[in-house]
Structures are given as C-alpha cells and as structure tokens.
Amino acid sequence: MGGREQKSVAWTPHARDCLDSILEHIAGDSPAAAAEVLEVVIAAAESLAVFSGRGRVVPETRSRSIREIFVYRYRLLYRTSAEQVEVLAVLHGAMDYERWLKDD
C-alpha cells in the first residue's frame, strides 16, 4: 500500500515576519501563551506536508492553489504546488485581507 507523498513546507520571509509580530504582541501579556501559539502554528504548517489540500481556497483570491487553515483566531495562508507548500502569511482573522495585500 502506498502512503501519501510528503511535500516540503517553506516559510516566506513575510510569513515569518507576520508570525513574529503576532508572537511579540501575545508575549507582551503572556510569554507562555506566545510559546503555545508558536508550537501550534508550526505544527499546523508542518501538517500541510501531507494534507495540503485540506484548507479552504482563500475566498478573496479565487486561486485553487492559495488556501488557508485556521489556527486559533489566525489565518495561515499558503500556496500549494506538486512538490511544496509555501506559507505566505499568518494573519489575524479580523484583519482585512485587501489591506494586507496593500501592505505586503
């Protein structure tokens, strides 16, 4: 029986910056909570190596290759290809996607 093929998971510099900003904000109130969020976000991203198609298509893009999963109140946006999952951003769920595009 063949197993699922694993893709590599890569983070864009922008995605790392997004996550760093979120963690700094959380750590201001609770370093322990920031550490937990980091652990859960990284685990969720790594899980995409096998299950990259499980996220929903980002409604604002209409591109089937750009998807998102939700981790707590954050949107983890990623692009899929045959070999790789590329994490594009981690955004607070209340953040306006169009504003994020302009800031990017």
Image (cartoon, helix red, strand yellow):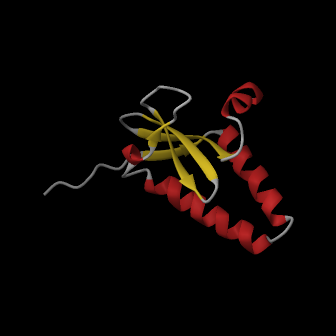
Percent position of residue 80, x then y: 44, 36
Count of numbered labels shown in the rendering: 0
Q: In which quarter of the view is residue 13 placed? A: top right
The residue sitting at 79% across, 71% down in the picture is: 31
| Quadrant containing the C terminus in the rendered view | top right
Is residue 15 found left or right of 46 in the rendered image?
Answer: right
The residue sitting at 80% across, 71% down in the picture is: 30
The residue sitting at 70% across, 69% down in the picture is: 35
- Residue 9 or residue 95, whichever sits in front: 95
- Residue 16 or residue 71, whichever sits in front: 71
- Residue 67 or residue 49, whichever sits in front: 67
Percent position of residue 3, x then y: 23, 55
Is residue 92 found left or right of 88 in the rendered image?
Answer: right
Q: In which quarter of the view is residue 32 placed? A: bottom right
- Above or below: residue 42 compared with residue 61: below
Percent position of residue 72, x then y: 61, 60
The residue sitting at 17% across, 54% down in the picture is: 2
- Residue 98 or residue 12, whichever sits in front: 98
Q: In which quarter of the view is residue 33 placed? A: bottom right
- Above or below: residue 15 compared with residue 23: above
Is residue 103 found left or right of 28 in the rendered image?
Answer: left
Percent position of residue 34, x then y: 73, 66
Question: Outermost residue toward the bottom?
Answer: 32
| Quadrant containing the N terminus in the rendered view | bottom left
